[in-house]
Amino acid sequence: MGKSAQLAALQLAIMRVLWERSEATVADVREALLAEGRELAYTTVATMLAKMERKGQVTHRAEGKAFIYRPMLGQEQVSRSMVTDLATRLFGGDVTLMVSHLLDGSELSRDELTRLKALIRRKEQEERDAR
């Protein structure tokens, strides 16, 4: 089954735990989510991990009676996929409109603006080099 890089909120929270730790048991994931204020039953976390495994998003190995889960999707892969989906669904694929919306709704420091300008210059250079 193909790996879906579109994640719901709970799936994304679980993936963040797995990305941070590289691998974790159901109990580890549940504990990390509890620390974030998400009170979930052990069975809920186990069921979600099983569903995510069927989708190819995570995999597991057995260690005694415990399953140790690890991510099959990279954080960058998920981020790109979800941002692309957001741009398409919410802004009709207009990246300029999306960035404008983000800039208008954010308080940016001088350093953040400098980094954004550098990203734009780098993208412009990549475009020139591709010609």
Image: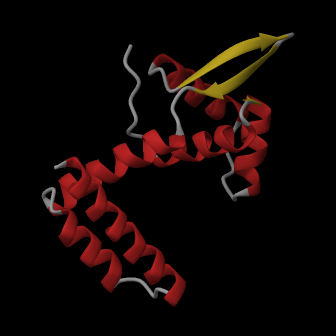
Residue sitting at 69 percent across and 50 percent down? 39
- Locate the N terminus by quadrant: top left
Question: Which of the colour schemes (rainbow, by chain, secondary structure, one colour) is used?
Answer: secondary structure
Q: Reply above or below: 101 against 53.
A: below
Position of 21 relative to 91 (above/below): above
Residue at 27% in and 77% down: 101
Farthest right residue? 64
The residue sitting at 44% across, 39% down in the picture is 77
* Residue 30 pos. (x, y %): 73, 40
Pick the residue in front: 22 or 8: 22
Asked if residue 83 lies left or right of residue 20, the reply is left
Can you give x and y, in whole percent of width and height, for residue 93 in the image?
16, 56
Residue 123: image location, x then y, percent? 31, 61
In the depicted view, which residue is nearer to us: 105 or 27?
A: 105
Looking at the image, which is closer to me, 28 or 121?
A: 121
Task: From the viewer's perspective, tell me whether residue 129 is left or right of residue 3.
Answer: left
In the rendered structure, the answer to whether residue 65 lies left or right of residue 127 reads right
Considering only vertical position in the picture, is 91 above or below 130? below
Picture coordinates of residue 28, whole percent (x, y) = 79, 37
> In the rendered picture of this protein, how many numbered marks are placed on residues?
0
Residue at image position (45%, 88%) is: 107
